[in-house]
Amino acid sequence: MSSSAIRFAIVAGEASGDILGAALIRALRVRYPQAQFYGVTGPRMREAGCDSVAGIDRLSVMGLAEVLPKLPDILRLRRDLRRRFAGDRPDCLIGIDAPDFNLGLERGLRRAGIPTVHVVSPSVWAWRPGRVKGIARAVDLMLCLFPFEPKFYAAHRVRAVYIGHPLAEELDQPVSRDEARRRLDLPPGPCVAMLPGSRGAELKYLAEPFARTAAWLAQRQPELSFVVPLAKPSLRPLFEQAVAAHAPGLRWRLVDGHSREAMRAADAVLLASGTATLECLLLDRPMVVGYRVSAFSAALVRTLKLIKIDHVSLPNLLCREAVVPEFLQEQADAAQMGPALQHLLTDAAARERQTAQFAAVRQELKRDAAAAAAAAIGDLIGK
């Protein structure tokens, strides 16, 4: 079959999926110059030549309170897509992340005989591993961003290929610490970046212990400054309240966005567990991780043993050994996070022990993820 007849349906669910989707479209077009692309898109995917059936804004919702009002529209969209793709019969359906939406869509279309690919594995190796049974029914191919994931899927007879992580290429552009500090208008002297999460629920539990940790450090190193990049303006009041109550008078710089510049500018970073820890590793900055959830959620996780891994931060999962201090729940307080950060600020050997491990991970993750994904998809569809 000629490449002119090949059609790819692609469904991305949020901004990060739009970035991945655009890169994948460009890589697939190298293999199939006349291929057609259509699906649920963001601006980058449309710019790459993907016809839009719907926009990612219809799926880009997080949290129960946000999802519930939009649930009827989301379910209607999935039903419409299933009907359309089943009729159009593209050569491959590619779901990018958004597993709650995409896996259900993929399962229905796989039953209809359409090859299905899912990009970005859900964290089934860490959280609720029983979900892999549903994944096995939904996908012909799982494309994984981390090297340890295909082994997990192999044990469950799911075809999986490691493609590397696109952030490894995206962040492979050196920006000096001095330049980052100039961009953020930071004062001279040592600096700690604090990233307490991107959601209100995270700041609810982390703003106070992070602010108290800053106060603990400033008592011992008064010359320290603190930069806090906030994911959205609505989060600023939550952190400002914590600063006013627990760490007034320090050298604070709160900024909207610019998380990567803040990490580049810092001598050490305190941050919530999540993708930001991977960005911090790729930016070669030493870090400490702190995280809290509600007491009820923590008790539920412990009682039901829902988490199956010993460490929660991506650097500790990716490095040969656990090199990043993690403080969870009751341990995420100034008395423990403060000394860990001070150790990184004052001990060059401690910083080197972390960042030496990071270098090997950066090299491992840098695989030209889009090209590797296109090759794996080509092998799947056999065209």
Image: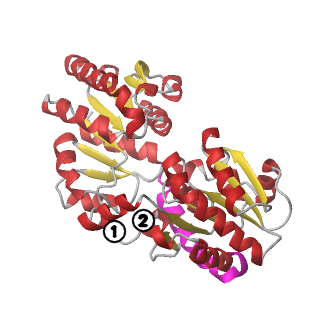
Q: Is residue 173 visible?
A: no
Callouts 1 and 2 close, C-beta under 8 Å: yes
Q: SS of the residue at dot 2? A: loop
Name the amino acid, label 1: Ile
Residue under pointer 1: 309
Please tell me how crowded label 2 is: few (under 14), some (14-19), or many (20+) other residues with Cα within 10 Å.
Answer: some
Residue 44's disc is: none
Q: How is the image coloured?
A: secondary structure
**Residue 7 visible:** yes
Helix, strand or loop at label 1? It is loop
Q: Position of residue 288 (x, y in %)?
A: 57, 69
Quadrant (top left, top right, bottom left, bottom right) of the N terminus: top left
Q: Amino acid at mark 2?
A: Val
Q: Is residue 380 magenta?
A: no
Identify the residue at horizontal 76%, vertical 53% (top origin): 253
Tell which of 332 and 229 is nearer to you. 332
Is 214 on the left or on the right of 103, as rendered? right
* Residue 122 place in picture, x, y as percent: 33, 50
The vertical placement of 99 against 220, above or below, is above
Total numbered circles:
2
Q: Position of residue 303 (x, y in %)?
A: 26, 67
**Residue range highlighted in magenta:** 345-368
Q: Which residue is mark 2?
A: 312
- Measuring 47% from the left and 62% from the top, which residue is drawn there? 292
* Left or right: 242 in relation to 201: right
Q: Label 1: few (<14), some or many (≥20) within 10 Å? A: few
Q: CA distance from mark 1 to mark 2?
A: 7 Å
Position above or below: 314 against 53: below
Quadrant of image for the C terminus: top left
Observer-nearest residue: 381 or 100? 100
Side (left or right) of 55 relative to 7: right
Q: Which residue sits furthest front?
A: 245
